[in-house]
Image (cartoon, rainbow, N blue to C red):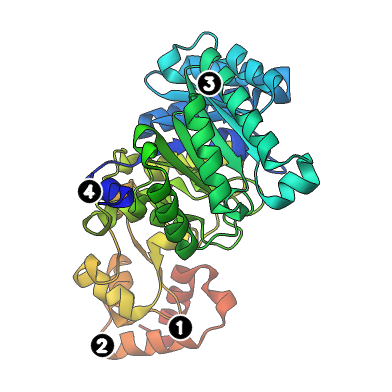
Amino acid sequence: MTPIADRLLLRPRPVIFSDTTLREGDQMPGSRLDADGKVEIARLLEALGVQSIDAGFPANSERERQAVRQVAESVNGVVVSGLARAVRSDIDAVASALSTTPRERSAVTVFIGTSPVHRTDKLGMSIDQIEATVRREIAYAASVVGTAAFSPEDATRTEPEVLVRLYRAAFEAGARVLGYTDTVGIATPEDVREVLEFLFAELPELEGAYFAVHFHDDLGLAVANTVAAADMGADIVQVALNGVGERAGNASLEEVALALHLHEHRYGRPVMLNLDRLYGACHQSAHRTGPQIHAHKALLGANVYRTEAGVHQDGIMKNPQTYLPYDPAVVGGPGITLVLGPSSGRAAFAARFASLGLGLNPEAESEVIRRMKEADRAEWDDPDALLRTKVAEVGV
């Protein structure tokens, strides 16, 4: 039996959610996050049931180091991690930021570029040199911080055989979390399945470590890639509230969680989060990080819980399951609003007539509806005012 089969046989096995809102969100151009904002979001994540928080990059500044410390001191029972290059001073900065945090709740993620373009044009290092660096700095990180994680930067553009070599080196040096990072968001779900199957087959020792994935959304595939990785047996998914992050952002925590939850029969990966807090946590977080949530954003956007189309409205009034993928209460979302507009059908108009106390006969109803549907879009800014105008025109 192959190692990948071994991992799949471990189902049902809950997915571990690691959130990077506090780091990736802070790296976005225009981010408004400060220490207070990070603490607020960290508490939201703790209440949500997230098991790990990527709190920041302490070597960036003293301000950042203190913010990571405040985050770690503000939560209980959550692992708090700091990011570090494979550089001794970066690792020391994480150790300092987490010095008041119990070792079992502190972690450091050590990263180094591993793809050909990073090796040649950014680092000017050979694979041998990178492996030696990984062994040395991971061993040091494991000695000064509770859990050491190894993250090969640009892993999805790194040769799989090079990843095998570096994962093995990191594991032997003491890393107990091994990350697979799509730094430029170029991967597809097919790539993810193929590479993870190869890695798990080549590295049976991964059973002694947690395997984590981190995808960016440059092709709009971060959520699909994350779900594919979970399906292949990845232990940890690194995600962010509202999908915030560098460039096009990261995999959205809420979308990954809901997809795995609604399709647990398919993936066999239980989601151990308080799902009914998702909607509120994401909206509260957006006030801190920005940007404004788009009306069409999955699970969160205003239009997700509003419908104007007559066929949909009629079906929802008879049975909400006809046109809803899930009960909004599952994620703590608002009730469905039937928006009166040019696309609405007779059932929605009749409901609005009744709510306004307009006792119209069928002929009058039909004429009012006809006149409203012929109105310009600009007149629909206030549907009730338009309705009353057309009722007056009909003379009823």
Who comes first in sequence, dot 1 or dot 4? 4
The image shows residue 36 at horizontal and vertical percentages of 59, 23
| Distance from the alpha carbon under mark 3 to that under mark 2 | 62 Å
| Disc 3 target residue | 71
| Disc 2 target residue | 362
Image height of 293 relative to 323, above or below: above
| Left or right relative to 65: residue 181 | left
Who comes first in sequence, dot 3 or dot 1? 3
Q: What residue type is labelled 4?
A: Leu
| Disc 4 target residue | 9
| Disc 1 target residue | 372
Q: Which of marks 1 and 4 is in front?
A: 4
Which label belongs to residue 149? none
Who comes first in sequence, dot 4 or dot 3? 4
Q: Is residue 119 visible?
A: yes
Q: Which amino acid does label 1 sit on?
A: Met
Who comes first in sequence, dot 2 or dot 1? 2
| Distance from the alpha carbon under mark 2 to that under mark 4 | 62 Å
Classify the position of the C terminus by image quarter: bottom left
Residue drawn where x is 23% and y is 44% of the image: 10
| Distance from the alpha carbon under mark 1 to that under mark 4 | 59 Å
Mark 4, secondary structure of its residue: loop
Mark 3, secondary structure of its residue: helix
The image shows residue 312 at horizontal and vertical percentages of 32, 75
